[in-house]
Image (cartoon, grey):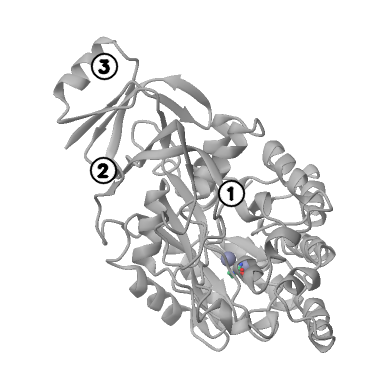
Amino acid sequence: MTTYIKGGTVITATGVHDHDVLVDGEKIVAVVTPGSALAVSAEGGAETVLDATGKYVVPGGLDAHTHMELPFGGTVSADDFESGTRAAAWGGTTTIIDFAVQAHGQDVRASLDQWMGKAEGNCAIDYGFHMIIGDVNDQSLKMMDALVDEGISSFKLFMAYPGVFLSDDGQILRAMQQAAGNGGMIMMHAENGLAIDVLAEQAVERGETAPINHGYVRRSELEGEATHRAIQLAKVGAAPLYIVHLSASEALEQVTIARDKGANVFAETCPQYLYLNLEDHLGAPGFGGAAYVCSTPIRTKHAHHHDDLWRGLATNDLCVVSTDHCPFCMKEQKELGLDDFRKIPNGLGTVEHRMDLLYQGVVQGKISLPRWVELSSTTPARMFGMYPDKGTIAPGADADIVLYDPSATWTISVDNHHMAIDHSAWEGFEIQGKVDTVLSRGKIIVQDDAYLGSAGDGRYRKRGLSQYLI
Ligand code: URP
Ligand code: ZN
Ligand code: ZN
């Protein structure tokens, strides 16, 4: 099957060019100058021609941080691998990296097998896994080496959630030393969970049980402190470090200092930390704020977190935008915390909107078109060992391609999204630009406002080592 994409503007991390693209089977085989002899013959021989006039032609997005079917707080995130990856496809994301979870007391291999089983045959788009190491011990440390060889080259640790996922500093150091030896990347949830739990308990004792208190007790200083500690431990352990879902200026400051000194420290942020705030969203009337409970939390509008994060995205102190997609319905899920914000399951549903939300940064002049592609596709692919199969438009790359219409305008709503949740954290957000057509390894899976793919189209992808390590 050959497809010729003509008349569009190809955006990659390195530039903007009026080029046509030829796809043969699952791969991009040529990027050609329109009207050239090569272009004429490629178009003439193609079975399908897609007219991309007026559209951007961009590499499919790679969301490096999702949680489909994640057990959390007595419930399970509402999108399974089928619905979540289909929603991702609607939004122009053609690869996810989800997190397999080794919970405390469980075996890493058995846990990974369980997550592989959940995903296999169900995904609309390609997928890989990071491994959450929830119990650092001799066995799990040894398993990290095996997993790197098997294409799972990144490991998430938690400084938050005491009694559930939290690793102490000694365990963190041991895991970092292991990663230093096997080439893996340590991903860190950097919040001081022990201090947060004290503040949370005190808040509840005072009768402060509403969702907004989730944001008050998870103080930005405690994200800054944990980020600083993680960076120092990574230095001692000689391991690369990737801070996940960074939301606070204090944390970004620590990353910036480390990077300025040349440390192998990287960080991602998520759309919720760029656009939502504690007062208007987490503080929504009644129990409405529960929709916005996630950790790290969305931050106050009375500081400059949003501006600082946009600065970080522009200067590369933040190098990836992922979603931390972990959706819970209001009904029966978020409602678990009606009387106590500590019981509200943590997470937002955003996998469908990441490309659009970040594109608003282009519209508002905060980032360039190539930077949009770099943050949402190219850098995550390089960071997690999937480039150049993923993350670019070039001969030899997978034909994961999005035709994006920059002139379309629309409004996000629970009524038009495809995620399996009963509300949208992005309700009413006006979006300029829209995904028009999506190809996943050469197959058209979204076109003319219809989903044309099927569960099982997506394949598990083994990953290599991060391509940013020195
Ligand atoms: O609120 C969040 N982030 N839920 C998912 C779990 C995590 O810490 O990433
Ligand atoms: Zn986390
Ligand atoms: Zn997460």
Sequence-wise, the earlier of marks 2 and 1 is 1
Tell me the kind of residue under disc 1: Val
Name the residue carrying label 2.
444
Q: From the top left corner, tell me how far across and down residue 355 is, in percent.
A: 50, 44
Name the residue carrying label 3.
39
Circles 3, 1 touching at the beta carbon (< 8 Å) = no
Q: How far apart are marks 2 and 3 (CA)?
A: 21 Å
**From the viewer's perspective, is the residue at label 3 or at label 1 nearer?**
1
Q: Which mark is residue 248?
A: none
Circles 2, 3 touching at the beta carbon (< 8 Å) = no
Q: How crowded is mark 1: few (under 14 residues within 10 Å), some or many (20 or more)?
A: many
Residue 106 appears in view: yes
The one of 15 and 261 positioned closer to us in this rendering: 15
Sequence-wise, the earlier of marks 2 and 3 is 3
What kind of element bears circle 2?
strand
Q: Is residue 192 above or below residue 380?
A: below
Q: How crowded is mark 3: few (under 14 residues within 10 Å), some or many (20 or more)?
A: many
Name the residue carrying label 1.
321
What kind of element bears circle 1?
strand
Query: Which residue extends farthest front?
Result: 285
Q: From the top left corner, tell me how far across and down residue 33 is, in percent.
A: 35, 15
User: On the rendering, which quadrant does ligand 3 occupy?
Assistant: bottom right
Tell me the kind of residue under disc 3: Ala
Q: From the top left corner, tell me how far across and down residue 421 is, in percent.
A: 46, 67
The one of 137 and 333 positioned closer to us in this rendering: 333
Circles 2, 1 touching at the beta carbon (< 8 Å) = no
Residue at point 72% right, 77% down?
210
Q: From the top left corner, tell me how far across and down residue 464 is, in percent.
A: 46, 53
